Amino acid sequence: MTQMKPFLSDNAAPVHPKVWEAMRAADSADSPYDGDALSAELDERFTDLFGRECAGLWVATGTAANCLALATMCQPHGGVVCHEEAHIEVDEGGAPGFYLHGAKLMLCADGHGSEGAKLTPEGIAALIDPIRDDVHQVQPHAIAITQASEYGRSYSPDQIEALSAFARSRGLGLHMDGARFANAAAFLGGSAKDAAGPVDSLAFGFIKNGGMSAEAVVLFDPEQANLVKYRRKRGGHLQCKGRYLAAQILAMLEGDLWLANARHANAAAQDIASGCRDRLMHPVEANELFVRLSQAEREALRAQHFAFYDWGEDAARFVTAWDTRADDASALGKAIANL
Ligand SMILES: *Cc1c(COP(=O)(O)O)cnc(C)c1O
């Protein structure tokens, strides 16, 4: 039987052996919830990684990580500015409204120098400047950006700096959805600090990049940790065997496994991209490719055992992961080039 060549999604990738090993090593009794020795290490490990004081808390999904972080900066009567195709808008089943008690998502479209689902200060200003300072209108409280974006684009340190300066000048919080933060950091040269810039909070994704069931909420104002802890419990995300989640995150941080895994995935994506040429809908700056392909072309690729999702009528999305076989990536690049 011919083996499938999987490019459906990085969340379909398996758990990295070092993460399994770390969970095995955590397999003795310790205090429940987040009272264990491993959970206690997280603040320090993230503080070392980002070079500024922060708190790190585990949760089981990126959705919870985003929403709990946003709860530190947006009141129920306020709004969170995000791109109209942001995960929090189109892929979280209304969780932001649930965790933020009805707060509104305020949607930016591309334009004003924005592309590939990345926000710009100009685009946000165009959305929020017409809002009157009047109780009849929802006031923005926060901005949420995605690193790498929903189209696999990475924000440069300058772009994050500009968004942060804009947010500060308007009194808004700045949150980063980092489901693919590792891939963006790898693309930008490998520094977690540069890839996050001066944001107020980060949902640091590990699951797509080799973890099993742990994402981190990183709060650059550690004073907010208590609020997130109470809400994490209330929201049903305080797992009683938290040490197994902490173990996954620590394993991913150990020796920069998070970065090595992302570099592998990004390299595979670049290999595929080299066969796509002008079919590419967006520059490849992480581990996702959006490729113009007709239905017949997609069928031809599926007949060669490549697995991927359609993207609308005339395109496909390919995602690489930490375990993508180099042979599969180069075969896909060649197959697309040969269409
Ligand atoms: C995958 C993903 C998440 C997290 O999704 P969950 O299924 O809740 O873990 C968040 N943001 C983006 C952009 C994603 O791609």
Image (cartoon, rainbow, N blue to C red):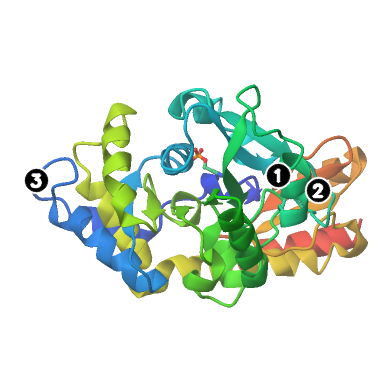
Upstream in sequence: badge 2 or badge 3: 3
In front of the other: label 1 or label 3?
3
For mark 3, give the secondary structure: loop
Upstream in sequence: badge 1 or badge 3: 3
Q: Do the residues labelled 2 and 3 touch (CB within 8 Å)?
A: no
Figure quadrant of residue 326:
bottom right
Residue type of the residue flagged with mark 3: Ser
* Camera sees residue 322: no
Q: Are marks 2 and 1 in contact (CB under 8 Å)?
A: yes
Q: Is residue 311 above or below residue 338?
A: above
Residue 84 place in picture, x, y as percent: 72, 38
Residue type of the residue flagged with mark 2: Leu
Q: Which residue position holds label 1?
A: 308
Q: Which residue position holds label 2?
A: 301
In front of the other: label 2 or label 1?
1
Residue type of the residue flagged with mark 1: Phe
Cα distance between the residues tagged 2 and 1: 9 Å
| Residue 31 - label | 3
Q: In this view, does 163 lie above or below 235?
A: below
For mark 1, give the secondary structure: loop
